[in-house]
Image (cartoon, rainbow, N blue to C red):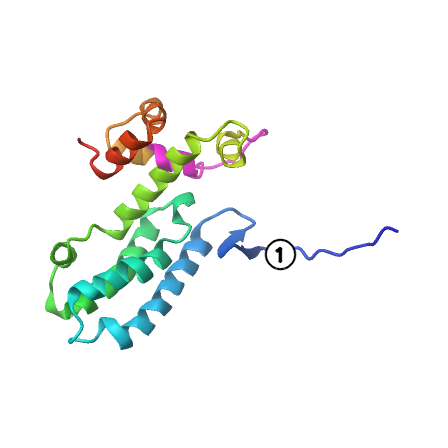
Amino acid sequence: MLVSVHMEQVDNFKFLGTQITCDRRPDYELRHTVNKANQVYHQLSRSIVGKSEISEKAKMRVYKTIFQPVLMYGTESLTLLDKHRSRFQSCEMRYLRRAAGRTRRDRVRNTTIRAQFQQVSITEEMERKALGWYGHVVRMKEDRKPRDVMEARPEGRRRRGRPRLEWEGYVERLAAQRGLSINDKKRLAQNRREFRKWLVEPDA
């Protein structure tokens, strides 16, 4: 017996902790991610980050094991634009300044705070993560879904106006900033060890 099922059409929904939107824009998901990280920060600020008796080493261990994973969750598959970078950097520096016992009124540069903790910017970590995911997908067999989706080319004509920066173009731009063309990047990605070394030391 056939059963009729009514499915509601929605503009966005959550799947495995990630917000999926009908327009495929990353704004909603990235804003959601930053809000989640801010909630974690406020919880940690009262119990750990704001406590002067807790060492900076312990605070940074919490940063890397709890706060940073929340802030970076799922961002390897999203296109990060300049307007998104400022939000993530603001969220990152809120934690680091609190851990260092500094406020914006102290007029200490972000680079100085990061150097104190020997920490690269959160956006640089996100870019490495995106490049790492690209290399992982390229090494997959051709019948794997992630690679199939990445290499798919939609048919038809696009809308008028400036084309949106897609994820593969975003990753290609990141690789170019590190001195690799798209073909060089694909060849290097086949060697997992060398590719990981390049991610950490692009000029090596």
Magenta range is: 154-172
Residue in the picture at 26% in, 46% down: 124
Along the viewing direction, whichever of 193 and 13 lies nearer the viewer? 193
Q: Amino acid at mark 1?
A: Val
Q: What secondary structure do most residues of the magenta stretch adopt?
A: loop
Q: Residue at x 11, y 58 (%)?
A: 116
Q: Which of the two residues, 86 or 19, is positioned nearer the viewer here?
A: 19
The C terminus lies in which quarter of the figure?
A: top left
Q: Residue furthest right?
A: 1
Q: Is residue 109 above or below residue 134?
A: below
Q: In percent of the image, x 31 and y 59: which residue is there?
A: 65
Image quarter of residue 12: bottom right
Residue 81 placement (x, y as % from top left): 35, 46
Q: 72 above or below 97?
A: above
Please give left or right for residue 50 compared with residue 23 in the image: left
As rendered, which of 190 and 160 lies closer to the eye?
190
The picture places residue 126, in percent across and down from the top left corner, at 32, 47
Position of residue 34 measured from the top left corner of the image (x, y, whole percent): 37, 60
Position of 106 with respect to 48 (left or right) is: left
SS type, badge 1: loop
Q: Would residue 168 be counted in the magenta stretch?
A: yes
Task: Verify whether residue 72 appears in magenta.
Answer: no
The picture quadrant where one finds residue 198 is top left
**Can you see residue 90?**
no
Q: Residue at the spot x=49%, y=28% of the render?
A: 141
**Residue 28 appearing in the image:** yes
The reply, left or right, for residue 23 in relation to residue 197 is: right
Quickly name the residue at label 1: 10
Residue 165 lies, with reference to residue 14, above or below; the image says above
